[in-house]
Image (spheres, helix red, strand yellow):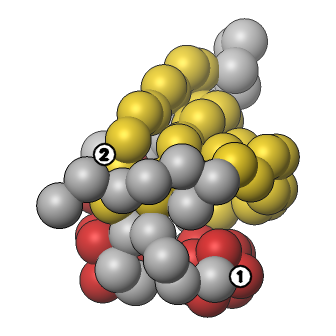
Amino acid sequence: MQHQLAVTARFRPETLERVLRVVRHRGFQVCSMNMVTVGNTDDINIELTVASLRPVELLFSQLSKLVDVGRVEIQQQTTQQIRA
């Protein structure tokens, strides 16, 4: 099962590392990722496509708890096989 997530966070050197660590610790695999800064602000938008057989809500709740994360949104869910 693949899931697309949109994360808005404050740009800090450690923010992206924290997001990726939570993804890995929750048992998800990153399929694709895109990060862009938002205008003249200190914010970044991270778009993630992750895969796992686990419910995406587990990842959603943990990402929402991160200090620098302002918003997490589940955008799309698709059924695709995960290659081992």
Which residue is identified by label 2?
Answer: 13
Task: Give the amino acid at mark 1.
Answer: Glu
- Image spot of residue 3 (x, y percent): 63, 54
Which residue is identified by label 1?
Answer: 57
Q: Mark 1 vs mark 2: which is more N-terminal?
A: 2
- Secondary structure beneath disc 2? loop
Q: Disc 1 versus disc 2: distance between alpha carbons?
A: 26 Å
Task: Give the amino acid at mark 2.
Answer: Pro
Locate the C terminus by quadrant.
bottom left
Q: Determine whether 76 is above or below 52 in the image.
A: above
Left or right of 37, for residue 28? left
Q: Closest to the observer: 80 or 20? A: 80
Q: Which residue is drawn at 55% across and 20% down?
A: 36
- Image spot of residue 75 (x, y percent): 82, 46
Q: Which residue is drawn at 72% across and 12% down?
A: 39
For label 1, count other residues whose C-alpha is less than 10 Å away and answer few (under 14), some (14-19) or many (20+). few
For label 2, count other residues whose C-alpha is less than 10 Å away and answer few (under 14), some (14-19) or many (20+). few
- Image spot of residue 50 (x, y percent): 48, 53
| Farthest-out residue, front | 81
The disc at residue 66 is none
